Each structure stands twice: as C-alpha cells, then as structure tokens.
Image (spheres, grey):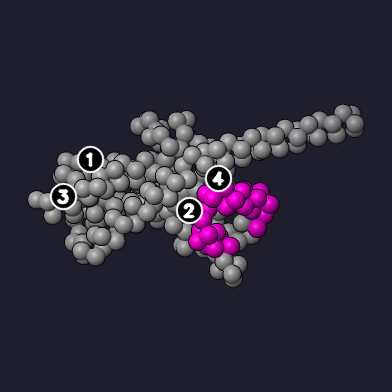
Amino acid sequence: MSSHRKTNYSRLCCLLVSVGAQVLRDTFDGIIPPTDLQSFLKRHPAHSKLQLLKKEGILNTMQWSKLYPAVPSSVSSTCFDPALLMILLRTICNLSPPPAGWDTPPLSMDTSRESDIARVKYFMNAVSNHALEASVSDAVFSDYWQRIRVSLVQLGGGGYEDVIDEMKNQEMDPLDKEHFVVLLKQWRKIEDEIKDRLTEVESVLQSSESEGKFLIIAHYLILVSLFC
C-alpha cells in the first residue's frame, strides 16, 4: 500500500511538471509567438523589466542565460523551466492578476486564463505540501488529479484531455518517479524563495506603467490644446 501511495504522489508530480509546464509554455507562446521572442525580449519594456527582476534576484543566472543566450537567435521557450515561465507570464505578458492575486487559489467560478495560471501554481504548492511523506491516498490522488485536469484543459485546450487521461494509469519507471518528485520540489523551492520579492517588484512595475500611461495622456491633452 505504501508503494502504491508513493506512486500516486509521483503521478501528480509528473502531471504538474510535464503537462503543467507544457500548458504554461503553450500559453506563453500564444502571447509571444516563438518567431517574435528574440525581438520581444530585446525591446525596452520587456528588457528593462527583466533587468529589474535579475537585479532583485528573482531571475537567477541560469534563467537569464536562457532568455539571453550566447547565440541570441537560439532563444526558445522550450528551454524555459516552469518557474521561469510563471515569472514571465506574470511580468511581461500584459496579464492582469486574478481578483485574489497570483498567490491565492481563485474562486471556482472564475475560469479566466489568469486564474487558471494561478491554479497551476496553487496545485504545485498543494501537491508539494505532501513532499515529506511523498505519498497520497487514492482519495486525495483522485481529487487532485481531477481538479488539476480541469484547470490544465481549460488553460491548454481539449487536446490535453487524452494525454492526461493516459498518464493516470500508465506504468512509471522508478527513476522517473524520483525525477518528477525532485523537479516539483525544485519548482516549489524557487517559488518560495522569490514569492515576496516578486510581489513587491510587480507593484513597482504596475506603478511605473500607470505613471507612463498618465504621462502619455497628459502629453496628448497638451498637444490637443495647442492645436485646437
């Protein structure tokens, strides 16, 4: 029974790390197409935000090298880890935070794209809370699996339904079990380390954007007054 419960936990880790990361990547690619990624990251708004995130220690050296590789044309979201994808979606993709914020589970009736992104993060935290024993009962497994499935399909599209359903009962190699447990633990560790700093930086960025919009409107009104 203990081995079975540990397999349950490994399956949940696999679902979040493999499918969850790919759904986040698809969402990111839908906002910033792969063909535009290099030029987008070079532009002032995105580049200045990312420089601030690096300065504040939110982006680590490895993540920065994925965004700005030695060969610029080689940049690709396929190299972005789940933590990096979540940071990018929150900061440079022009998404509005869910009503309850990025770090709080959204209300069940809120099925917006932003809320489903927040749910992926919530379930990552919820599942990793079982990391000490690295096992969950069948009841907990079924509950988490169904709720994660709904969120990932809502965010990523119906094409993920069969993939997720096949994963639920497929055999897992012992090395894969440990691999996905470790990856989820690493994802959670990065999230915990940057959580408060990221929230603070987001507030600074939002204030800067609001001030920028105000200046644009003010300049426009001045021009209108001069020529009317």
- Comparing marks 4 and 1, which lies closer to the viewer? 4
Could you say which is closer to the camera, residue 19 or residue 195? Answer: 195
Quadrant hosting residue 41: bottom right
- Horizontal side of 59 relative to 13 (left or right) equals right
* CB atoms of marks 3 and 4 within 8 Å: no
Amino acid type of disc 1?
A: Asp
Amino acid type of disc 4?
A: Thr
Q: Residue furthest left?
A: 1
Task: For residue 178, say whether it is visible.
Answer: yes
First along the sequence among labels 3 and 4: 3
* CB atoms of marks 2 and 1 within 8 Å: no
Q: Disc 3 marks which residue? A: 5
Magenta-drawn stretch, dominant element (helix, strand or loop) = helix
Amino acid type of disc 3?
A: Arg
Q: Disc 4 marks which residue? A: 91
- Horizontal side of 51 relative to 77 (left or right) equals right
